[in-house]
Image: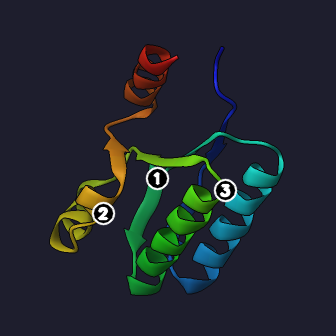
Amino acid sequence: MNPDVKVVQPTGLLDGSKANQVRREINDCLEAGAEIVLLDLKDVTFIDSSGLGSLVSALKTVRSSGAKLYICSISDQVRILFELTSMDRVFKVFANREEFDLEVQKVT
């Protein structure tokens, strides 16, 4: 049986105000019964510290609800930020949505 996967796809700069919007979208996904939330960052150009903090907060919320949060399609600039802050060890990051889909198919 396939898990219920919901995708959140922010755009542009992921700063404090945009991060709050992303958290609300993630909460909506959880309320709709998502077992997995995929945060597709292909259209995000930069994440500031408040955006990064918001992602960590969202991860805690998702985990406490018994669901899983994954990230895909990060830009080189965002990847460097994740590596410098060790967020690449906190989040499971997929190269793109296709890689994520293959992983989900293996698990189910």
Task: Please tell me in which quadrant of the rendered image residue 25 appears.
Answer: bottom right
Residue 5 x %, y %: 65, 34
* In the depicted structure, whether residue 96 falls above or below residue 99: below
Q: Nearer the viewer, residue 16 or 107?
A: 107
Amino acid bearing label 2:
Val
Amino acid bearing label 3:
Ser
Residue 36 x %, y %: 60, 40
Q: Quadrant of the N terminus?
A: top right
The residue at 61%/66% (across/down) is: 61
- Looking at the image, residue 88 sits to the left or right of residue 56; the answer is left
Amino acid bearing label 1:
Leu
Q: Which residue in the structure is indicated by mark 3?
A: 65
Instruction: Say the numbered circle drawn on residue 78.
Output: 2
* Badge 2 density bin: few <14, some 14–19, many ≥20, Cα 10 Å: some
The residue at 26%/65% (across/down) is: 82
Q: Which residue in the structure is indicated by mark 1?
A: 41
* In the depicted structure, whether residue 56 falls above or below residue 108: below
- Looking at the image, residue 19 sits to the left or right of residue 88; the answer is right
Query: Badges 3 and 1: C-beta atoms under 8 Å apart?
Result: no
